[in-house]
Structure formats: C-alpha cells, structure tokens
Image (spheres, grey):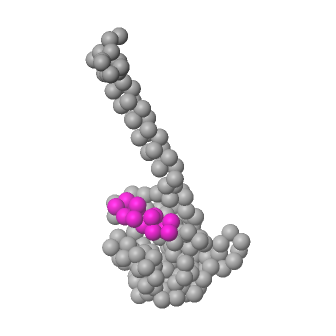
Amino acid sequence: MATYKKGYKKQNTETVLLQVIIGIIVAVFGFVAIAFIYDAATQWKDYNYYTLITEYNGITEYKNGTDTALEDYVVYFYQDSCTNCSAIKTDALRIGNRLNADTETFFLANTTTMTDDTDYLTPFLDAVDLTDTEFGTPALLVVVDGQVAGMYVGSTDVLAELNDLIDGNVEGFDF
C-alpha cells in the first residue's frame, strides 16, 4: 500500500466504504440497545405495572398490601376499548408513576373486567353528584383523608385533576 510524504497510508475506496458500513452497523446496534434499555426502564407505561382493583365494593375503603387503610389515593377507571382512555394513557400513567414514587397511591380499575355490579358505585357517585349514566371512562376517583373528594369523568377533567394532584393543588391530598 502506498503512503503519503508524511507517512500516512493511502486507503483505497473499498476500504473506506467498508469502514463506513461497519460504522453504520455499529451505530444501528447502539440505537437499538438504547431503545431496549429505555423501554425496560419505562415499565410504568403499561397498565400491568400498577395495582388493579377488581371490585367496586369497598373501593372507597381501600387498603394496601399490609391491610393498612389508605387515607389518600386515586383510582383511575379505564376500558381497553375506550379511545379516550388510549389517548390519555401515557400522560395518565406518567402522572400515576409520579404519584406512586414514595408510596402506592395510584390504582387502576378496568371497568370491563370488574367482578361485581356497578351498584357499589352509587355511594361515591352520590357524594360528588354524578349519576350512573354520567359515569364513563376515563374517570378518576380521588379519596382524601378516607373520604371521596372528587370524581372526574372525561379525558380533559381526568388529566386536569391528575396535574392538580402533582402540583399540590388538591387540599389535603398528600402523596
């Protein structure tokens, strides 16, 4: 192989092209590895990452895994087939993940898989002046000091209340 006056080796175009191709392959593998690591680190984007409530009965008297009654918590109601739920899923779960940072205060309820009748909803719907026909998904039940503090239905209201919770704008709610 020929060399320049200063001692650098001359490279033919095939060698340069081979180095470029190898560089591109290494870069692609690097991006794939970063994407894989990011996806593994963001499990909070999946409904299965959170505690799922399966019954309406006793939802306002929820206890954690050690049978201690929770004072302040949030229940997010969703359905798998709900387009509005899908639209706000990432934002709602991102905020839910922040609410769960220190203690578990964010719970999910898939209304299509609840095992009991919606009659158990009546007491907390009455507490916030909603009827059964106004209840839909997405919805958010906020419990403060063991009492129903609010029920929010619709993607706009749910996200607004979740943001208020994170910002500390809900009196008495401590997460």
Q: Position of residue 149 (x, y in %)?
A: 48, 86
Which residue appears at 36% of the width and 76% of the height? Answer: 160
In this rendering, position of residue 56 left or right of residue 34: right
On the picture, is 64 further left or further right than 113? right
Residue 153 visible? The answer is no
Report the magenta residues as a range. 85-98
- The percent position of residue 163, horizontal first and vertical second, equals 40, 75
- Which residue is at the front of the view, 125 or 100? 100
Q: Quadrant of residue 64?
A: bottom right
Whether residue 86 is in magenta: the answer is yes
Q: Main secondary structure of the magenta part?
A: helix
Image point (53%, 57%), residue name: 48
Residue lying at 45% horizontally and 64% vertically, measured from the top left:
94
Residue 152 appears left or right of 175: left
Tell me: residue 61, above or below residue 97. Answer: below
Given residues 103 and 142, the one toward you in this image is 103
Q: Please give the name of the residue rendered at 47% of the width and 50% of the height, measured from the top-left corner.
A: 38
In the image, is residue 88 part of the stretch drawn in magenta? yes
Q: Dividing the image into 4 quarters, which one contains the N terminus?
A: top left
Residue reaching furthest top? 1
Find the residue positioned furthest to the right: 66
Q: Position of residue 167 (x, y in %)?
A: 43, 79
Please determine whether, in this image, residue 97 is positioned above or below residue 7.
Answer: below
Spot occupied by residue 61 in the image (x, y as percentages of width and height): 61, 80
User: In the image, is residue 129 above or below residue 94?
Assistant: below
Residue at the left extreme, as displayed: 13
Q: Please count the marks in the image.
A: 0
> What is the quadrant of residue 71 in the picture?
bottom right
| Quadrant of image for the C terminus | bottom right
11 vs 140, nearest the viewer: 11
